[in-house]
Image: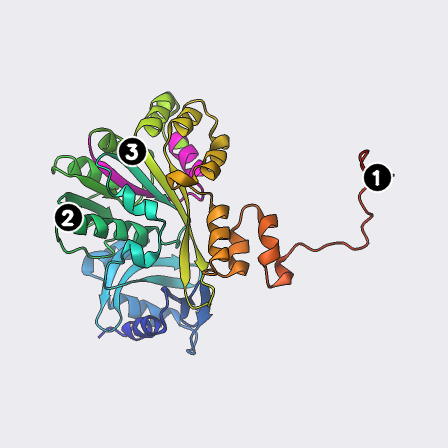
Amino acid sequence: MARIDAFLKLGTQQGCSDVHLAVGVPPMLRLHGDLLPIKFRELRAAELEGYIAEILTHSQNQHFSKGSDLDFSYVSTEGGRFRVNVYRKDTGVGATFRTIPAEVPTLEKLALPPIVAKLCDFHQGMVLVTGSTGTGKSTTLAAMIGHLNQTRRLNIISLEDPIEFVHPSKNSQVIQRELGTHIPSFAEGVRAAMREDPDVILVGELRDAETISMAMTAAETGHLVLGTLHTTSAVKTIDRVIDALPVEEREQTKSFLAQSLLAVVTQVLVKTADGHGRKAICEVLMMTKAIAKLIQTEQSHQIPTQLQMGRDLGMQLLDQALLGAIAARTIDPDDAYTYANEKRAFQKYVTDTTMLPKVDLNAPAPAPTSNSAA
């Protein structure tokens, strides 16, 4: 057993999402969003390098010794499966281990909006799941692939960096390919996938113009494409896709989004009301003729109004979703306040008043308006 497995086992037993190891500090666990040190000495450089060396393959060790970061999956004999990032910093090496549950989560267990399951019924087009790092995008996509695998007979090709959840083929055939192991890049992976009779292509990250362009081509030519972007709202997602491609392709890109983008699901993870977990809260955009027109006329700033009015189509703004979850008492209102865009509407729910804006009691009162009573 690798020595690092003891820390991973502890993290798994505590229900942590991540285990952090870095020189100069004790091992740390991320529990319900908070980073907490465990009772252990500060890790020394040679010690941690030894821990990490025990779990690297020969090729990974060579790659890391040249100064490159590493992303890979690791199966611990004690603590389960992990997505790993190994890196170097000023004081030495460091590593982050993201826990991957043994079972693929279901859409129902994640309590995602019902519209997410309906997105899996489409046969062609693009669905983007977005959010900042650590907001559960990969978990949501895994649940969507799991749903497709259970309910439809498809050829599903998943391009990942690295492979996280393992999908045994059920009603569908699921082919999982890993960046650096099976494919040199996401763009090449999409190009190859289109020659492999796919019905669904999952692209782990639309991280560059070439990958975005290839994914768009796949969506336009009769495939359902699922992908992720590190964007924090539906509007920012659309702007990011348009800005990522060359200026001369701008009109073509807007046309693609208007015709082939099916939906954008942007999520954050908010602490549950009991403080013992986190729940995905989603902003949802569904493509409509009105939104398509706003995209083509470069009026994306008006899209939030469409989301606000589109509840009957499954759309919602992030703030609407947060307020709904507060009303249902499923999330912590204080944590919800930190994610809200228009915070004023959330102030009355906050229990920790130190979070609220300070009011200067000595400030002069606002001058009366012309409509004020005499």
Give the amino acid type for the residue marked by disc 2 in the picture.
Ile
x, y percent for residue 289: 38, 26
Give the amino acid type for the residue marked by disc 3 in the picture.
Glu
Image quadrant holding the C terminus, namely: top right
x, y percent for residue 125: 26, 34
- Which residue is label 3 attached to? 210
Q: Is residue 227 magenta?
A: yes
The label on residue 373 is 1
User: Which is closer to the viewer, label 3 or label 1?
Assistant: 1
The correct choice, above or below, for 312 with respect to 243 in the image is: below
Q: Which residues are magenta?
A: 222-242
Q: Is residue 305 magenta?
A: no
The label on residue 175 is 2
Given contact means CB atoms under 8 Å apart, are the residues at marks 2 and 3 in contact? no
Local crowd size for mark 2, using a 10 Å CA cut-off: few (<14), some (14–19), many (≥20): some
Distance from disc 1 to disc 2, alpha carbons, whole Å, reads 72 Å
